[in-house]
Amino acid sequence: MKDFIAISDYSSDEIKDLLEIAIKLKRQFFKKGNKPIFRGKVLGMIFQKPSLRTRVSFDMAMRHCGGDALYLSPSEIGLGKRESIADVARVLSGYVQALMARTFDHAHVVELAKWSDVPVINGLSDYNHPCQGMADALTIVETFGMKSKGLNVSYVGDGNNVAVSLMHVCAQLGWNFTIASPEGYDIEPNAVEIGLKLAKKSKSKLNFLRDPHEAVKKAHVIYTDTWTSMGQEEETAKRELVFPPYQVNAQLVSEAEKDVIVMHCLPAHRNQELTDEVADGPHSVIFRQAHNRLHAQKAILARLFDVV
Ligand code: CP
Ligand code: NVA
């Protein structure tokens, strides 16, 4: 593994291997603390958008394993504006041992990886959010076990970056993925095509629906995300008219399997896409899911640094 840009860049065995490493590192962390496997290494973190979880979990992942992290804000770097992406990548490659980048345009993180001599991790782009996808898979595996083929994962809402990575990780691991999204807010066709290829290999099913009630029937997992992603703020009012039927509330949850878990990558817009009652209710795993970012990312870093 040179970079971590998309879940679909890896084989399903590589994804399972990452999950196994994450489980081991999580156990080790809570037992005696992690070993200093990242000693002498610094992760440069380029952010073009705000972040709580991605920033803090990557920083802590490095520190827990004896390494360090450096936050580079949008105004400092001016990626592609003050300096070309290729030059930023080549300069930083001489200072840090890996890069994490949160960009608007997916092509920008790809460009960074092209020019960087050190591994590049995608910390969310407009296209996907693979680190989130790994933490989501870890959370599902912890709940239902690694051998949970045939599991039904239902995503309700915008066919956005988070939906893309979730669809791809489900298709890699043999879980059925269903999405209910309003017309005009579907997952982009290129991502669907990749997902269908992965699903064919793992013999899982992908379903693309409009009706959230139909989507959650037999669901073991209900997942939702914001109606308006970062960078789409000017569409907020329009989206708030379209998405209310896609709210994950107690009624919708009651239509799924009895032991369904409810997931959200966070930040949540409470009482929009997810009600307080559900977010803080017995089915919700949203905080364990957020904490799993830390453990999943330690596994990604460990593989990229080739220290496990
Ligand atoms: N889920 C997630 O990526 O959160 P942040 O935007 O806070 O990093
Ligand atoms: N889809 C959201 C995810 C935030 C973690 C966004 O891109 O803003």
Image: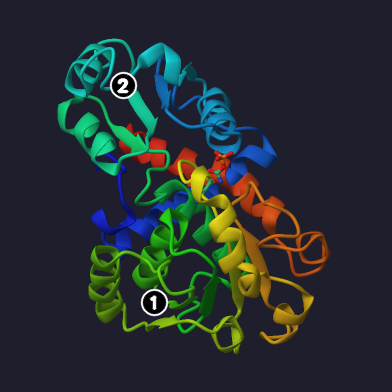
The correct choice, above or below, for 67 with respect to 279 in the image is above
* Residue type (three-letter) at the residue carrying disc 2: Leu
Q: How is the image coloured?
A: rainbow
Residue 300 position in % (x across, y down): 40, 42
Q: Circle 1 — which element?
A: loop
Q: Quadrant of the C terminus?
A: top left
Residue under numbered circle 1 = 174
Q: Quadrant of the N terminus?
A: top left
Q: Which mark is residue 203?
A: none
The correct choice, above or below, for 7 with respect to 32 in the image is below
Is any part of residue 2 visible from this angle?
A: no
**Measuring 59% from the left and 38% from the top, which residue is drawn there?**
53
Is any part of residue 167 visible from this angle?
A: yes
Q: How many marks?
A: 2
Question: Left or right of 126: which side holds 63?
Answer: right
**Measuring 62% from the left and 49% from the top, which residue is drawn there?**
266
Mark 1 Cα-neighbour bin, 10 Å: few <14, some 14–19, many ≥20: many
Residue under numbered circle 2 = 79
* Residue type (three-letter) at the residue carrying disc 1: Gly
The Cα atoms of the two marked residues, 1 and 2, are separated by: 38 Å
**Measuring 40% from the left and 36% from the top, which residue is drawn there?**
301
